Amino acid sequence: MAKIVLGIAAPHSGMLGKPAETWLQDGERDRKNPILWYRNKTWSYQQLEAERRSEGFERFLTLEERNKRHAACRKAIDRLREVYTEAKPDVAIIIGKDQNEIFLDVMPTFAVHVGAAIENGPPQRPNYAPSEPIVYPGAPDLAAHISSSLQHDGFDITCMTKMPPNVWLQNKIVVPHAYGFIYHEIMNDRAPPSVPIYMNTFYPPNQPTIGRSVEFGRALSRAIASWDASVRVALVASGGLSHFVCDEEFDRSILEMFKNADLDALQRVDERSYQSGTSEIKLYTPVIVAMAERKCRMTLVDYVPCYRTEAGTGEGMGFMYWKP
């Protein structure tokens, strides 16, 4: 039977692949964003900066501090890469989401890539792809089994045999950035056969709730356990904690729930907290469920809040793994 030998959860932020000198440039995008989610409601940038002025984010915006935090993130990525390499998985299942990259006119709540090939490369950004085109192997038999098992458990699944063109990137056939980051940064582009699974956490109206995400995790765990093959499986979640407004207090409370596999607590959090980029926390839940069922404890490699404006916009970067 298939055996999960590793669980990983990692952010895939563009900030991780850029020099810290450029982070304040990313902040200019936040200043123009009229809908910034923070503490269960939306704010304009000006409202948010006024609300959080007393927190003194200016001290985190110096180049010295940005370089320090960037280095901490890169060190954590290096550690996750080591853990992944040591696990020697035969197959990987990667849980992520699309961000209007390959799904535009159609946005499935849950989708599974069942094709034999997964393409990456230019013009994808450097921390998401190598400089030359590359094709990673899919795992069609496992993907078909997972799709069938999830369907049997009451989840309506969209199946893709081919990757649609990436509308962000000149309509090239390039995997979305959430997956590219894992293939390129964690797997060093030496990916085993893999199954990308998509959850639409980002865009209303058909986002799965946190409760539905937990149930999806249980169904996925059953699907993996019932796969009749003697293979070592890595289960990987690609997503961030709080963003595009970084909320360190909220992130640390979520990380404590992850550590204790406290699924009830995760489901008691107001659903409005899981909006915009922060919705990617839902992508972590299948990994937490599957590893908790196998009595695996989370190892937090690092948590690094990374800021880019005086309003505290930025991203909470959490790097963690689970091993038997």
Image (cartoon, grey):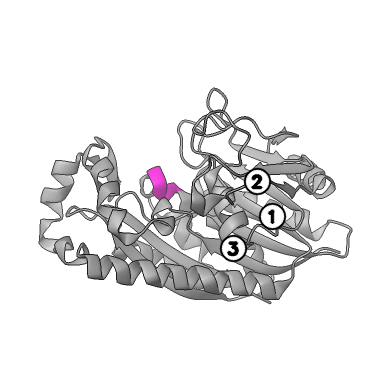
| Mark found first going from the N terminus, 2 or 3 | 3
Kindly indicate the quadrant of the structure image that contains residue 171: top right
Q: Which residues are magenta?
A: 274-279
Residue of label 3: 186
Q: Amino acid at mark 2?
A: Ile
> 179 or 241: which is nearer to us?
179
Q: Depth-wise, is mark 2 or mark 3 nearer the camera?
A: 3
Q: Give the side of residue 218 with respect to residue 78, left or right.
A: right
In three-dimensional space, the C-alpha distance between marks 1 and 3, rounded to whole angstroms, equals 13 Å
Disc 3 packing (10 Å; few <14; some 14–19; many ≥20): many
Q: Give the side of residue 202 with respect to residue 218, left or right.
A: left
Disc 2 packing (10 Å; few <14; some 14–19; many ≥20): many
Q: Position of residue 183 (x, y in %)?
A: 62, 55
Residue of label 1: 93
Q: Is residue 16 magenta?
A: no
Q: Give the side of residue 285 with respect to residue 318, left or right.
A: right
Residue of label 2: 197
Residue 172 in view (yes/no): yes
